[in-house]
Image (cartoon, helix red, strand yellow):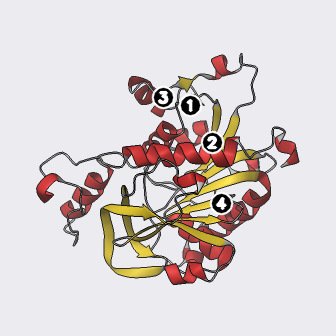
Amino acid sequence: MPIRIDNELPAKQKLEIENIFVMSNLRADTQDIRPLKIIILNLMPTKIETETQLLRLLSNSPLQVDIEFLQVKSHKAKNVSKNHLDRFYQTFDEVKDNKYDGMIITGAPVELLEFEEVDYWDELCEIFDWSQKNVYSTWHICWGAQAALYYHYGIPKYTLDEKVFGVFPHFSLDDTHPLMRGLDDIYYVPHSRHTTIKRQDIAQIKDLQILSYSEYSGVHIISDMDCRNFYITGHSEYDRDTLAKEYFRDKNKGLDIKIPYNYYPHDDDKLVPIMNWKGTANLLFNNWLNYFVYQKTPYDLNTL
């Protein structure tokens, strides 16, 4: 799927080297089709890395996708320059009158805080409300999924005794669901979190369906019954070395961190990690875009 992004976005050069179909604004403006409009609320501190990961997965299909990035103005980012945010990101006030085919809300490293203690919680709640009327389908990732489930349904998160950290096997609970089409019987997804949500809490909500599960890392994908909102606890978008960076960061700080599960060959952190989730990541994002964005959203977004 050709993705339409700013020519100067740092991710563009790296994606082009990987032969990802990136379309410039100039070329896109000459095409007489309606592109899908996707907005990404990027709450991760590693913004440029997360941009690249998500754009890679939103690319390479026959459809054109216009990408916009959203930031919260009630939080000051520490790991990315103000110039980058000013150049490539918008605030909620700038987009609240717009409508979008799809939205992605990322995770954030605030999971050990109570939701209400997060400095941008009120703004995020406003965005959650806005997305229900202005976005056709929303893809929530990790803490973003926990936060949305808590806000919309009152589902709590629980602090774990030990961090879920590694690449875990999963299986589908509904092989006929379009989002799960093409996945292997057992497929792998990275996780990195200190908190979890419980299956029994979700089962009490009639509007929610658990689509996939892991005996090791728990609930993975949840959908509402209209398939307008998806909540994903793992990180299929991660690069090969993302968990390694987290592992060595904490190890070098002297923190109590175990080697990521099922990640390094022979659990040897001197070896190159095995990436066995790339196919799953591409299938999940392609299925979401195809079945729940492109085929469902109205041509005229004003009628959303």
Q: Nearer the viewer, mark 4 or mark 2?
A: 2
Using residue 65 as the reference point, say whether residue 57 is left or right of it: left
Find the distance from the CA under tag 3 to the CA under tag 1. Answer: 17 Å
Q: Nearer the viewer, mark 3 or mark 1?
A: 1
Using residue 129 as the reference point, say whether residue 8 is left or right of it: left
Q: Could you classify mark 4 by the number of other residues whose Cα lies within 10 Å: few (under 14), some (14-19), or many (20 or more)? A: many
**Residue at screen point 40% across, 29% down:** 14
Find the distance from the CA under tag 2 to the CA under tag 1. Answer: 9 Å
Residue 29, percent from left and from top: 71, 20
Tell me the amino acid under the disc marked 2. Answer: Asn
**Residue at screen point 51% across, 38% down:** 55
Verify CB contact (< 8 Å) between mark 2 and mark 3: no
**Residue at screen point 21% across, 73% down:** 256
Tell me the amino acid under the disc marked 4. Answer: Asn
Find the distance from the CA under tag 4 to the CA under tag 2. Answer: 15 Å
Q: Nearer the viewer, mark 2 or mark 3?
A: 2
Q: Could you classify mark 2 by the number of other residues whose Cα lies within 10 Å: few (under 14), some (14-19), or many (20 or more)? A: some
Residue 164, percent from left and from top: 33, 70
Find the distance from the CA under tag 4 to the CA under tag 1. Answer: 22 Å
Q: Earlier in the sequence, mark 4 or mark 2?
A: 4
Say which residue label 1 marks. Answer: 61
Residue 6, percent from left and from top: 59, 29
Q: Earlier in the sequence, mark 2 or mark 1?
A: 1
Question: Does dot 3 land on a helix, a strand or a loop?
Answer: helix
**Residue at screen point 19% across, 54% down:** 264
Residue 63, percent from left and from top: 63, 30
For residue 12, which numbered disc appears in the image? 3
Say which residue label 2 marks. Answer: 290
Using residue 23 as the reference point, say whether residue 131 is left or right of it: right
Verify CB contact (< 8 Å) between mark 3 and mark 1: no
- Report which quarter residue 100 is drawn in: top right
Say which residue label 4 marks. Answer: 229
